Amino acid sequence: MPRIPRTLTVSIIVLALAVLSGGCGSAMGDPREDLSRAINDFHGHLAWGRYQDAAGYLPESQRSQFIGASEAENASIHYTEFEVGTIDVNRVDESAIVTVTLRWYREPDYTIRQTRVRQVWVQDDENDYWYLTERSDADRLGSARN
């Protein structure tokens, strides 16, 4: 039986430990990583018209109203992209203020417009999950600017 070089054996062990401990490290890591993922998921679902999935990032009491309003707007409003700006995490009350720029158009105009949105996200301690709890008035499409 051929002998495996010692450096290869050590490399395999180090790699295996890194892979196996990856989940533990993220649980103790920077909360902005999970928040960034939640923000991107929410807006990605919004852009693709997956309102049921996007509503999963809202408190339960807001979900059905959000889905109804989003589906009603879907006939004429389409999101083309979003850009996450600042993320200001408050570790004391486990919340974050986030700015997002949404680009969208309304049929039949097709002029790309952009709206800057201020959002408040709160982390659920029990589930280690981020919820979008508050959106600014600028997030209403009627107040958007070119």
Image (cartoon, helix red, strand yellow):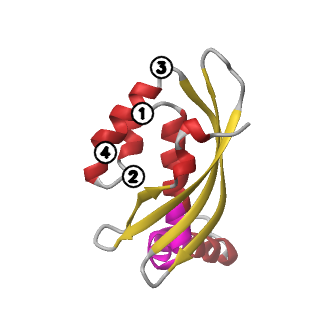
Nearer to us of marks 2 and 1 is 1
The amino acid at mark 3 is Ala
**Label 2 – label 1 distance at C-alpha:** 14 Å
Residue 63 percent coordinates (x, y):
31, 45
Residue 60 visible? The answer is: yes
Which residue in the structure is indicated by mark 4?
A: 63
Look at the numbered discs 3 and 4 and tell me whether their residues touch, using CB distance below 8 Å.
no
Q: Quadrant of residue 94?
A: bottom left
* Disc sitting over residue 70 in the figure: 1
Q: Quadrant of the C terminus?
A: top right
Q: Which comes sooner in the sequence, label 2 or label 4?
A: 2
Q: Residue furthest bottom?
A: 92
Nearest the camera: 106 or 96? Answer: 106
Q: Which comes sooner in the sequence, label 4 or label 1?
A: 4
| Residue ID at (48%, 47%) | 42
Q: Quadrant of residue 85?
A: bottom right
23 displayed left or right of 13: left
Is 22 within the magenta? Answer: yes
Nearest the camera: 72 or 31? Answer: 72
Which residue in the structure is indicated by mark 2?
A: 57
Q: Magenta segment range?
A: 17-35
**Label 3 – label 1 distance at C-alpha:** 9 Å
Few, some or many C-alpha atoms within 10 Å of disc 2 (few <14, some 14-19, many ≥20)?
Answer: many
Which residue in the structure is indicated by mark 3?
A: 75
| Residue ID at (51%, 79%) | 90
Q: Residue furthest top?
A: 108
**Label 3 – label 4 distance at C-alpha:** 19 Å
The amino acid at mark 4 is Arg
